[in-house]
Image (cartoon, rainbow, N blue to C red):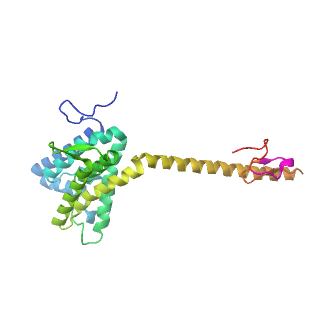
Amino acid sequence: MARSTSSEFGLPPFIGAVRQIVIVCVAFYVFQLLLAAFAPAVGSAISEIGILEPNHVRHGWIWQFITYPFMGGDPWQFAVSLAGVYFIGPTVEDRIGAEKFWGLFLGSSILAGLAGFAVSLTGKIAQGPALTVGAATNAILMVFYLFNRNAPIMAFFILRIPIKWLVVFFAALETAYLLINNFALFYFVLLFGLGAGYVWYSLFLSRRTSLGISEKYFSIRNSYYRWKRRRAARKFEVYMRDHDRTVTFDEHGNYIPPDDSGKKNGGSKSGWVN
């Protein structure tokens, strides 16, 4: 049965990978809040382990590229980012499936984190921690746009605008925050999330890429079989010469009968064909 794309109140369905991601993120965030209230030392230690911090990554804490999306920070930023996953995610998940949606969520987070970490190596910009699902939300927004380039969307429940302008709006807003906050890593990672979404779409989600990969696979496979045929032909020629008989094959491994030795590439009706 096809999944419904909206509830009777106009809200997206709360099912599939989107529901799993939202529940996991909310559970982690509530857990962090409880630790901060009742066990501050433990909460601080878990935050230090989970958030993306370039200094820690340089010392081998590479798991932070995976854990930082699940670490909550400012309640408003956390709520807005997770709302983006909930409102935009179901449409994307319907298009690509639950497994690929999880791949998009985690893969884009890792790509954005890696890009932010690379910039942080300058030692001048992209400093400080990065956390929350914001980068993945931006990636999902970008993929939504790439699948629905001319689609309008309800922004803030009151404005119906083309999706491309919503992407531009969030990119401009986050760029402004980047400048205001002295090029902090947090906002670099958010912006890189848009780029990560584009990269992930181009590599794994677009039909053109899938067709290109399939064509390349079959081309390599056919080249291998042609090479095996030519190799077998050469071995057979050697075998027949050892038994005082001469047989001829062309450059493609096709047999050329003795009376048609001047013909090429299956010119004889009795020859092999490609």
Quadrant of the image containing the N terminus: top left
Q: Is residue 262 magenta?
A: yes
Horizontal side of 63 relative to 27 (left or right) equals: right
Residue 63 visible in this rendered orientation of the protein: no
Q: Quadrant of residue 44?
A: bottom left
Residue 220 visible in this rendered orientation of the protein: yes
Count of numbered marks:
0
Image position of 113 with respect to 265: above or below: below
Horizontal side of 207 relative to 155 (left or right) equals: right
Residue closer to the observer: 109 or 249? 249
Residue ranking furthest to the left:
37
Residue at left offset 71%, top offset 51%: 252
Residue closer to the observer: 153 or 255? 153
- The picture places residue 38, in percent across and down from the top left corner, at 10, 49
Horizontal side of 211 relative to 219 (left or right) equals: left
Q: Which residues are magenta?
A: 255-264
- The picture places residue 236, in percent across and down from the top left corner, at 79, 49
Residue ranking furthest to the right:
244
Q: Quadrant of residue 117?
A: bottom left
- The picture places residue 161, in percent across and down from the top left corner, at 21, 46
Residue at left offset 48%, top offset 46%: 211
Quadrant of the image containing the C terminus: top right
Residue at left offset 13%, top offset 50%: 76
Q: Is residue 76 magenta?
A: no
- The picture places residue 61, in percent across and down from the top left corner, at 30, 60
